[in-house]
């Protein structure tokens, strides 16, 4: 089993979600994250005033999957999340030793 963490632009979330749904990924965890990178901070506008933010606002998707589906998921995120600009994000893939569904006590791929 694998865990895929994808850091993406907020503006690309709908495209990424739809691309994942097309390949059968119907569940993932989503959280708002802040980071620093090559892009530098972003300029925010509030009531007509421009403010420099020291961080970059992004979304992090956490997806648990079987090893066979990893490449399809990574490709779907790449296609839907890419703008070609600095700051498009990163995808990381990790090994997962065990997954347990709390409600049914199912383990492994059945728990995903």
Image (tube, helix red, strand yellow):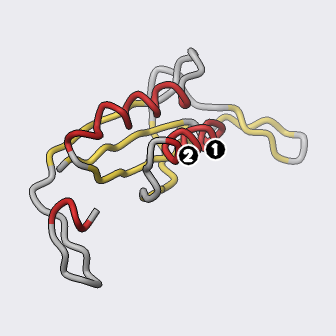
Query: Which of the two residues, 31 or 64, is positioned nearer the viewer here?
Result: 64
Residue found at the far top of this picture: 84
Residue 86 versus residue 54 in the image, above or below = above
Q: Residue at x 90, y 40 (%)?
A: 48
* Badge 2 vs badge 1, beta-carbon distance below 8 Å: yes
Count numbered badges in the picture: 2
Q: How packed is label 2: few (under 14 Cα within 10 Å), some, or many (20 or more)?
A: some
Residue found at the far right of this picture: 48
Q: Residue at x 38, y 37 (%)?
A: 73
Report whether 15 appears left or right of 75: right
Report whether 53 appears left or right of 77: right
Q: Which residue is mark 2?
A: 17
Q: Which residue is mark 1?
A: 14
Q: Which mark is residue 4?
A: none
Q: Quadrant of the C terminus?
A: bottom left
Report whether 11 appears left or right of 93: right
Rendered location of residue 46, percent (x, y): 82, 46
Q: Quadrant of residue 100?
A: bottom left
Q: Secondary structure at mark 1?
A: helix
Q: Tell me how far mark 2 sits from mark 1, CA to CA.
A: 5 Å
Q: Secondary structure at mark 2?
A: helix
Q: How packed is label 1: few (under 14 Cα within 10 Å), some, or many (20 or more)?
A: few
Q: Residue at x 18, y 65 (%)?
A: 99
Rendered location of residue 86, percent (x, y): 53, 18
Rendered location of residue 65, percent (x, y): 28, 50
Rendered location of residue 108, percent (x, y): 15, 63
Residue found at the far left of this picture: 97
Residue 107 versus residue 33 in the image, above or below = below
């Amino acid at each position: 089993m694998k865990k895929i963490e994808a850091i993406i632009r907020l503006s690309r979330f709908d495209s990424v979600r739809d691309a994942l749904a097309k390949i059968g990924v119907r569940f993932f965890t989503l959280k708002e994250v802040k980071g620093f990178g090559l892009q530098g901070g972003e300029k925010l506008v509030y009531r007509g005033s421009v403010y420099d933010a020291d961080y970059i606002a992004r979304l992090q998707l956490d997806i648990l999957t079987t090893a066979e589906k990893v490449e399809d998921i990574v490709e779907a995120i790449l296609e839907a999340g890419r703008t070609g600009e600095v700051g498009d994000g990163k995808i990381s893939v990790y090994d997962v030793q065990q997954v347990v569904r709390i409600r049914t006590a199912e383990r492994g791929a059945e728990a995903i």
